Image (cartoon, coloured by chain):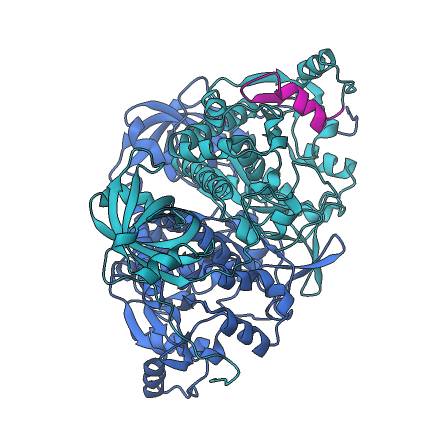
Chain colours: A blue, B cyan
Amino acid sequence: MTDASLPTPHHLPCTIGDLPVARIAEIAAFAGQRVQIRGWLHNRRSKGKLHFLQLRDGSGIIQAVLFKGDFDEATFARADHLQQESSIVVAGTVRADERAPSGFELQADGLLVVAEAHADYPISPKEHGVAFLMDHRHLWLRSRRQAAILRVRARIVKSIRDFFDSHDYVLVDTPIFTPNACEGTSTLFETDYHDQKAYLSQSGQLYSEATAMALGRVYTFGPTFRAEKSKTRRHLTEFWMVEPEAAFLDLDGVIDLAEDLVCTIAQDVLRDRGPELDLIDSIRSEAEEHRQLKLRREALAAIRKPFIRLDYADAVDQLHELGSDIPFGDDLGGDDETILTQQYDRPIFVRRYPAQVKAFYMKRDPADPVRSLSVDMLAPEGYGEVIGGGQREDDHDTLRAAIEHHKLPMAAFDWYLDLRKYGTVPHGGFGLGLERTVAWVCGLPHVRETIAFPRLMDRLRP
Amino acid sequence: MTDASLPTPHHLPCTIGDLPVARIAEIAAFAGQRVQIRGWLHNRRSKGKLHFLQLRDGSGIIQAVLFKGDFDEATFARADHLQQESSIVVAGTVRADERAPSGFELQADGLLVVAEAHADYPISPKEHGVAFLMDHRHLWLRSRRQAAILRVRARIVKSIRDFFDSHDYVLVDTPIFTPNACEGTSTLFETDYHDQKAYLSQSGQLYSEATAMALGRVYTFGPTFRAEKSKTRRHLTEFWMVEPEAAFLDLDGVIDLAEDLVCTIAQDVLRDRGPELDLIDSIRSEAEEHRQLKLRREALAAIRKPFIRLDYADAVDQLHELGSDIPFGDDLGGDDETILTQQYDRPIFVRRYPAQVKAFYMKRDPADPVRSLSVDMLAPEGYGEVIGGGQREDDHDTLRAAIEHHKLPMAAFDWYLDLRKYGTVPHGGFGLGLERTVAWVCGLPHVRETIAFPRLMDRLRP
């Protein structure tokens, strides 16, 4: 297809001679050398015979200093009129500079404009409304704070995966398409699957119980979907969840595993993403300032074993003392979690919830069948539930009766009941919500900034 | 809720005193020690005063030898009648044994039955049909070959993630819910999204182009969905894809990146999953034997740089010589890929396909606008396409004209066109299909065994 309606294709210019290309994150390795850096103009200012260009390449930001005497007149003049977000290549010598955030600046001697940005770049330094920024999310991600959040998120994902891989948990991706609306359709997204109905998974747990019986220790880590009509700072319709599951793991084992994982995440982020945390701290909106959160390095440093362990009954007692009117036997609400977790600087495990507020597959406590062998982990500083889990019902007849009791479609659970027919063992696991974890680690007021393109009840684009 | 209809809950017995629990994968560390191993009875045989129990714990299989003199009569007798897949705990001393696959066996002195399996365990050593096995996928995964495939898959995932993390590509999870049917609805799964239509993502690429402009180098790695009515050995409706995307990456850079990634995968699997590969090789069906594949260690050892690089035009010439009647200008079909890749023991990059067979966003070759700056990587031994990618159109007006030319809804691409308005740069990337890669690495005849619970046109359960 050569189509006359299409302009003639061409290559964009993007190199200055054969100078080595340096990435800003690795600039220290090029100290004293002449290099070229490719990226975008983040900001600029001028002072007499000097132009200062803030150049970002995605890995970091560096200041390029252009002295008039080093450039021809046209190039130097153009540098003073470049639009924000224009793509440029700057050549120059890497110089140590103590005042620079990266410790280096570029003494420029060459400038190539790859493509000038249109003059109407919508995001300016002034404070924009969230709806406006979310409409321009594809550009908003170029801001330093949003980019830093995404880097912290990626580090948390790596931390989680490395933790399970190194503890011999086998990653087993569980299916998104599921044939049955196991717990009612009201919170499920439905699709036509080659003339059957299919639902998007809310959790891989039931499948992970099967793979744990095959591989001993497993985890699944993927997107999950909830069609809940919730507009809160804690809910997305599409969110990522990691769910470990292990044979011969009891409630105490589940709690220890969760504790180790969360400590590892805190330590990894603190060690490897300190500058990003500082940056996030340094650019807060007024509304965020009101929450009076700790600086994030300080908050993460406090995440040490042992976490607080409370039985549900004790948690309710504490809540009553704190002024909550939660009826004994009810699940904790978001407000209860906020009040309770504001009392501590480390996470709280709330154990042994009433069986009636937990799912049908949760094992009941043999010592007190009203309670379940369940646990939620609530993050401090008002963040609330980040983890939910527990021990699973391992007895075939008890599980069958629970399915009947909950009026669930028995045929859908044939395979799940098989796990109790052929070599059942005590087993358990949990689910950790990635976006809530990122929000807490970064000290964000809302989960919507924890993922590149958040999906909320009223937001499906860009 | 204490409900009289539910049986009284109880704990399953699962420990023999306070003996240390050993996992079979780490058994060498316990040589000479007395331990307990928890797992399932994989197989058993008896000979006089000896019972031999094959015990699997998910991390491996070990033989426990029970001598009559070491047990009370009832326990010894019971060991000879245990059903396959019963959950058991065996105590004993770890002894080196050169004949054992793990190098060790357990000289047993204690046996605890956690739960006897029902006598009708459906999967026996005889060869079952695939439909039957897929119906019992939750149990089939306990077989050694299926478990080995899942372990290889998990290693490949880790290899891919480590590769990109260590090359400073930032993981950015792109959304599954997308608002527009950008390339027609026929292959898309649709869902009602709070009274709007949403579609399940077929690729994160367009979003990754946006995040590459923010972070320089990014990758997305998640499930993708195709509603195609294809029943072939290469198609799932739900499959995982990793998609790197980078600013300032041209077609040659894309090819080099893909080559490095695939070499890394082959080396990592070869180094860390050799025993699993051998096991997969050793248990083949007759149909599989017919394909006369190499032993997998040998196949992976051959995956070395440089791979074959062919322009599309040369690939078509070769195909004609090999007897194909593919018309020049058509996309390669599955059969063509099979014929072509059977000629080589390493992957083939086919470059510069006709623009008309590639997507609207593919950059056309400035030197010859009929061709696109595209590349597919075809895996050897008949496996065919595993990677597709190339350089993206970076010019605003050219891209806009292409969208019009393809009669796509312009409004849906507003944000995508913004990437060309504000600092466009040359950029590119590719998508690697995880399941096809696993099938090739393991030498499997069909992608359905590469994922725990495959979703095919006619299979949505268990």
Seen in the image, is A421 located left or right of residue A156? Answer: right
- In this figure, what is the number of numbered marks? 0
Q: Residue A239: x, y in percent? A: 52, 58
- Of residue B71 and residue B332, the one placed in the foreground of this image is B71
- Of residue A366 and residue B12, the one placed in the foreground of this image is B12
Please determine whether, in this image, residue B329 is positioned above or below residue B180: above
State the residue at coordinates (50%, 69%).
A396
Asked whether residue B63 appears in the rendered view, the answer is yes
Seen in the image, is A150 located left or right of residue B460? Answer: left
Q: Residue furthest left?
A: B32
State the residue at coordinates (52%, 19%).
B307
**B342 inside magenta stretch:** yes
Q: Residue furthest top?
A: B321
Q: Residue A228: x, y in percent? A: 59, 69
**A294 inside magenta stretch:** no
State the residue at coordinates (46%, 83%).
A330
- Of residue A368 and residue B132, the one placed in the foreground of this image is B132
Q: Quadrant of the N terminus of chain A?
A: top right
Magenta span of residues: B330-351
Q: Residue furthest front?
A: B48
Seen in the image, is A185 located left or right of residue B256? Answer: right
- Of residue A314 and residue B455, the one placed in the foreground of this image is B455
Seen in the image, is B130 located left or right of residue B261? Answer: right
